[in-house]
Amino acid sequence: DVHAASASTGIAAKTGGGGVTNTKSNKTVPLKKRATVKHSPPATSTKQTRVKKPRRAIPVNKDYIPEDEQPSSADVVGGRGGRSNHHPGNRPYWIKILESRYHYRTCQSDSGKTMIAQEIMNYVKNDCGGRFLNL
């Protein structure tokens, strides 16, 4: 279980015992302990605590598509799963989003980003004649 040995001194370091074993006399010599320095905290603390925002409330009643009504091919359908992912009305919506992505990313102001999002919504509602629905 020897890790390191010095040929000139005949001392080998062993694991476990808390010391070094001299291979010539087979005696264990205790290792010197290092001095520990304790650092005191600064007199004034400049660290600021972060205030957590409250979590967004999940609505209890969501507006889902009524059972007797089916979304048209112009409607944008949101939700989880393949039914919303592959709905034909989502295709022009996503094409418009991809066309606007560069302008949205390079926009410097929040009002400019809001205008781009509003243009996409107006495109779906007015140009395509669609609605935004949840499954």
Image: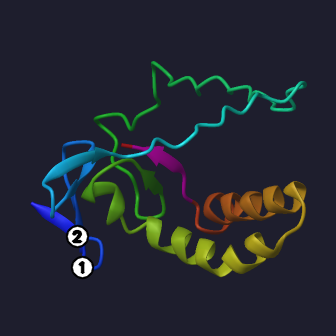
Mark 2: give few (<14), some (14-19) or many (20+) Cα within 10 Å. Answer: few
Q: Which residue is mark 2?
A: 10
Whole-percent x, y for residue 56 in the image: 59, 28
**How many angstroms separate mark 2 from mark 1 (CA)?**
5 Å
Query: Relative to residue 96, is residue 31 drawn left or right?
Result: left
For badge 2, the amino acid type reads: Gly
Q: Main secondary structure of the magenta part?
A: strand
Q: How many marks?
A: 2
Residue farthest toward the top in the current orientation of the protein = 60
Image position of 33 with respect to 88: above or below: above
| Point 80% across, 55% down: residue | 114
Q: In percent of the image, x 43 and y 50: which residue is there?
A: 78
Q: Label 1, on which residue?
A: 7
Q: Is residue 134 left or right of residue 9?
A: right
Image coords of residue 116 (percent x, y): 77, 65
Q: Amino acid at mark 1?
A: Ala
Q: Nearer the viewer, residue 100 or 35?
A: 35
Check whether the beta carbons of the residues at disc 2 and disc 1 lie within 8 A of each other: yes
Colouring used for the render:
rainbow
Q: Compared with residue 78, is residue 61 higher up or lower down, i.e. above or below?
A: above
Please report the bounds of the magenta region as a residue range. Answer: 130-134
**Label 2: which secondary element:** loop
